[in-house]
Image (spheres, coloured by chain):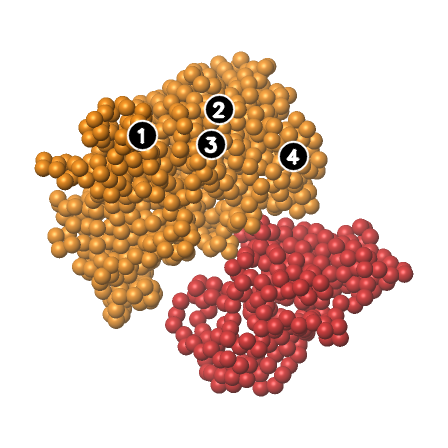
Amino acid sequence: MGDLKVIGKRIPKKDAPLKTTGAAVYIQDMKVPGMLYGRILYSKYPHAKIVKIDTSKAEALPGVKVVLTGADVPNNFKFGFIKDNPPLKTGKVLSTRDEVAAVAAISPEIAEEALDLINIEYEELPGIFDPLEAMKEGAAMVHEEFKSNVLKMPWKFVAGDVEAAKKASAFIAEDTFSTQWVTHCCLGTSGCIASLDINNNLTMYSNTQIPSLAQNDFLEALKVFGFKNKRVRVIQCVIGGGFGSKLDTYAYEYIAILLALKARKPVKIVFSREDEFLATSPRQCTITKISQGCDKDGRLTFREMEMILDNGAYTSWGATTPSVMMVPISSLYKVPNIFYRAKCVYTNNTYSQAFRGYGNPQATFAIESNLDQLAEKAGIDPLEIRRINANEPGEVTPQNFKITSCGMKECIDEVVNRLDWKNKSGKHNGRGVGMASLIHVGGAARVYKSDGCGTIIKVDDNGKVDVITGSSEIGQGSETIISQIVAEVLGMSIDDINVINNDTDVCPWDVGAHASRTTFVAGNSALGAAQKIKTQIMEIAAKNLGESPEALEMKDGIIFSVKDKEKNISLGKVLRKVHYTLGGRMLVAEHFYDPPNENFDQNFKGNLSVAYAYGAHGVEVEVDKETGQVKILNYIAAHDVGKALNPMLLEGQIYGGGLMGIGYALGEKMIWDKGYLKNGTFLDYKMPTVQDAPPVQAVIVETDEQAGPFGAKGIGEPGLVPTAPAIANAIYDAVGVRIKDLPITPEKVLAALKEKEKGNP
Amino acid sequence: MKDFNYSAPKTVKEAISLLGSLQGEVKVLCGGQSMLVLMKQGMLAPEHIVDIKGISELDYIRFSEEKGLTIGALATHGAVEKSPIVKEKYPVLAEMEDNLAVVQTRTWGTIGGNVCHGDPAADPPAVFIALSSKYKLMGKKERIVNAEDFYKDLLEVDLEHGELLVEVQVPPMPANSGVAQEKLMVQKGDMGIVGAAAFVTVNPSTGICEDARIVLTNVASIPFRAKGSEKVLIGKKIDEKLLEEAGQIASEEVDPPADTHGSEEYRRDMARVFLKRATAKALQRAQQKN
């Protein structure tokens, strides 16, 4: 790759000064002229008939402009993955986050007060809060029209012959694992401003992480509302974190549109922290039955998994997480025979959605905990069983994933060496070590028909570059990475690169910030566009200098002959020459990159991603046997990233993912008790803070992925995938108890220790 | 949050006369770190708020050998945490502050506000009770109350209409005494599933425990004075076995809540463990002084 000037350097995030000084404009800060404030009234009960709604008092409150109920939603509009969710409910409510009425008023305080004046008569119905109950014969239907609480989705993957493999296995370990609801805890809560012009074209100020898809959703909604052939413009304010929470469209957005249509004024709805806990969609909780086997040498023979997911009351894109759970289930380590089936089950709980890792953490918790159980049965060091079965370059997995670059073994070795595994494992003296590996998509993921991203580059008269990209900056650093890529190609400083990434009227298509795809897809798109514009610049400069383009180089805004540096021309001059000439032209290039990956076929086979990301986490813990508290003494997170385009941002992703995973493992849990959220505040929802951050060593393993921009693969999600099983395995190594139900609270560990003392396994 | 009338007196005198004259529900605001949360949750909607943040005469931390430590109501947690005299004479208070919430809360939150909030999970009331502290209240007349007697019920304290807590008085540490505080946190700085503050004095020649004051947090509706446990310890040489017995008594005597953070059973068990741990540490400190 020659000498890289900008790529691979520790460059601070371009937007860091904005965010640290408070200059960044979030949706919370946004105001548009004439704007009203919307608030939503949520259901009082998890399952009830709405007998009567009286909004007259709210309507009479001075300052209230519009009050809406389900009756005001035109043409039975519903949204969601299978369109089962009306933005305002009529007839029945199915969860305590069901929207039953909404208000637009001249101030947020008046809107809030108006909610208190809405009188709703409910007739409470018994609810179903446990997916196992919901699956029983004769269970009440959450959605009567569907005739079943199990979603009609064919989540099943089979490879080889698991039954035969079981018979041939020397060792088999089986168990059941479960995971909890956790929520994203974005510092920037959800929000939008819906603004309609006189022709009912919609401008949506938003913090979505899927601007193009949201644009499409809103267009569809306008159509159903009776406004055909309209335009929708999505403008993203600075986004204060997404993590999947903003990867779908939600009731509040449609409610804002409906309020704005009725009020004929822009309407802003921004979630309070309490709203954010209640009304955004958490990671789905799961129950997983798993069985894995190996031969006498520790080679894995089969993996069998059955999962039940609590879907909640409505269906979002989150119901497709079993497709990503399949990634580790089919392809983490070399396993020839696979059986997997998942059921998403309706309940009267909150409905789940996408969350960093998209199902992978739940599946990996079961796989990697169970793998340690198998290793123990087989009498093999947990580290050896992972080495023996590690994925390798050139492999084609049972799901037809074509493994290109793969640094899994290197990651395992980093963990082993840095943890001093050989000396520390197997002591059972209150301190222990554990590890877990991961596979995730690292070269995009063809979930939708398109997996593409467009980039437009234009160069202005002063030699500065505008990069107009479809990709979204959600804090992950895409703006900086795209600047680095373009700067590297054009031999410029990243300060000369301006990234425009927040307006669908201007920016090209992209399917959104998901699947750890932005660096890979938007990066490749930007790389292609930069190369095209460079070709144009060099041709014009060559004409002016009387040289061939091949003889020229470009650096710091100057194009010069490699042989004779005196022969040079500034980029600005090149530009002015093309603009200030009769028959002049623009210097603009566009590039659309859609990766050569595949949608799954009906059997869930297909090369979902162009490349796969690998990693291994290792942790040393100390367990307090009197309290059950787990203290992390050392944490190694080794990741195969292809190539580190910016090690500083990359480490940030690993630290952030690791800490999020530690919260998932040890403390975070949304407590939904019979349909009511019991801990919807940061006082009661135990997210680790910076004060809890243990020493995490981020280890970067480079494997140079040929298809990636400058060799890079995705790293957005992997950081939290193997955390929980690594910790659970370390606890087992320390004190001999295996916690199979997340989170691993002190109380659970202590109870398990007491059971162990009694001689119960 | 509902609207309220706001006033910000500049002196104690002004504040007291204002507090005495206001009708309806009145709340004193200082750092607001506990009260604003309750107001945001709609659990509290006072008609009047009297903000005492501007009464600079109450912002002090003083020490004298005779009187001990006096902390003005406006002294922040951060000020206590960083105070050199606190670190030297009452290091337990600095240790407590290190595990009290986060730096932002400690920067805004005040000692006066904390002890008046009446949260049985809060650390300062327990530590102050263990240290035999008193609170000075100003109203129509001045009152000095034992910290221990100040707590009446969950979020209920002995503050009459028109009264303001102006000072926490911590007596000098007796010779041969030690004090320590421990709590079981899921997040560093959280309220603690259970906590314990212990104060003991030990006769240097006999090694016998002459006094013990142990207070547990988050195990009852008020800070819980573990009198049964203290009784077992006083007059004896404290060893592992005795500590276990004292802990056992506490686990039986407490009346802990069961909530999302811990079951009643677990809290009882942790009352035992943390009583032992805090007392053992206090004992060790008392012995080191000898």
Chain coloured orange: A
Label placed on residue A437? none
Q: In what element is the residue under mark 3? A: helix
Label placed on residue A407? 2
* Image x and y of residue B194, in percent: 63, 55
Q: Amino acid at mark 1?
A: Lys
Q: In what element is the residue under mark 2? A: loop
Q: CA distance from mark 2 to mark 3?
A: 21 Å
Q: Are marks 4 and 2 on the same chain?
A: yes
Of callouts 3 and 1, which one flags the residue occurring earlier in the amino acid sequence? Answer: 3
Q: Chain of mark 1?
A: A
Callout 2: few (<14), some (14-19), or many (20+) C-alpha neighbours within 10 Å?
Answer: many
Which quarter of the figure is the C terminus of chain A placed in? top right
Of callouts 4 and 2, which one flags the residue occurring earlier in the amino acid sequence? Answer: 2
User: Which residue is denoted by mark 4 in the rendering?
Assistant: A432
Look at the image and give the colour of chain B: red
Left or right placement of residue A299 versus residue B179 in this view: left
Q: Amino acid at mark 4?
A: Gly
Foreground tag (4 vs 1)? 1
Res. A518 visible in picture:
no
* Image x and y of residue A247, in percent: 33, 42
Foreground tag (1 vs 2)? 1
Q: Chain of mark 2?
A: A
Of callouts 4 and 1, which one flags the residue occurring earlier in the amino acid sequence? Answer: 4
The answer to which quarter of the image holds residue B113 is: bottom right
